[in-house]
Amino acid sequence: MNLGLKERTALVLGGGGGLGRAISIALAGEGAKVAFADIEPTAIAGTEAALAEIGGKHIGIVWNLADLSQIDANVSKIESEFGPVDILVNITGGPPPTPASGQDPAVWTKHFQSMVLSVIAITDRVLPNMRARHWGRIITSTSSGVVAPIPNLGISNALRLSLVGWSKTLAREVGKDGITANIVLPGRIATGRIKFLDEAKAKREGRTVEDVSAESTATIPLGRYGKPEEYADVVTFLASERAAYLTGSVIRVDGGLIASV
């Protein structure tokens, strides 16, 4: 299947992490020009090395999403090197595990800016050029917690769910311009974030990480954690020409983990 991504310009936020790196690699493999962003220079270097093996055009940008003042300069850099952004993949880091109650309002504000407001502002920055060319893909990665809230991830559950409402509303606004907007939510995908959460739960409950992981795996119908590459393949399809009639959706890549319809 020809996905029609050759020479398209993609911007992958969180491109140094497990999911973001896998998505960057998958898009590059389809011939897209890939700009990827991360707050950690070492993470940028890791993705850079992986993309160098594939070849093609790519650029890594050290980017603190919480600092909204960086947006215009960073997007302008991408536009000057690759042209306007055709595909925006929104991935943000997750907050620490916390209950929903008793959190300082400053903590909510901090994570709202980095997880929600940054996504909205960056999307607004690239939308005018997408509209002008009558083509665009906006794909936002959230969490299974937006469907089935995850215990002790109160901030994540609340803030990521706000992005679902935003994306659905946006999809109706930009569809006539040839732009799609979709949410993709991972279940238990084998990334550093999941390892961190398993370790945190093990410590909190006085158990071994192996026990926590085995318990979690037992709830997944496919009987295993997902691979980042499997998640990336779904995102890459959503970014493609073939997904032109798919918008306003929430796509689960969870191995059947979420029990609800």
Image (spheres, rainbow, N blue to C red):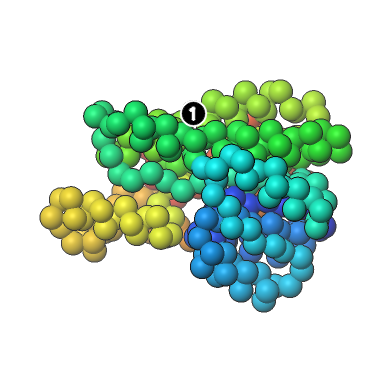
Q: Nearer the viewer, residue 159 or 174?
A: 159
Seen at 57% across and 64% down, the residue is: 44
| Residue 23 seen in the figure | no
Q: Residue furthest left?
A: 206
Identify the residue at image location x=42%, y=46%.
94
Disc 1 crowd rating (10 Å Cα; few below 14, some 14-19, many 20+) is some
Rendered residue at 69%/33% (across/down):
124
Q: Residue furthest front?
A: 69
Q: Quadrant of the N terminus?
A: bottom right
Report which residue position mark 1 lands on: 162
Q: As displayed, is residue 61 above or below residue 99?
A: below
Number of marks = 1
Closer to us: 232 or 113: 113
Relative to 21, is 91 above or below? Answer: above
Tag 1: residue type?
Ser
Q: Quadrant of residue 27?
A: bottom right
Q: Quadrant for the C terminus, please.
A: top left
Residue 248 location in percent, x, y?
63, 30
Q: Is residue 174 visible?
A: yes
Percent position of residue 165, x then y: 54, 25
- Relative placement, left or right, of 156 versus 240 is left
Q: Measuring 34% from the left and 59% from the top, which residue is drawn there? A: 195
Q: Residue furthest bottom?
A: 53
Measured as percent of width and height from the top left, residue 170 is found at 65, 27
The extreme right residue here reads: 133
- As helix, strand or loop, the secondary structure at mark 1 comes to helix
Q: Is residue 89 above or below residue 21?
A: above
Q: Position of residue 178 (x, y in %)?
A: 80, 33
| Quadrant hosting residue 70 | top right
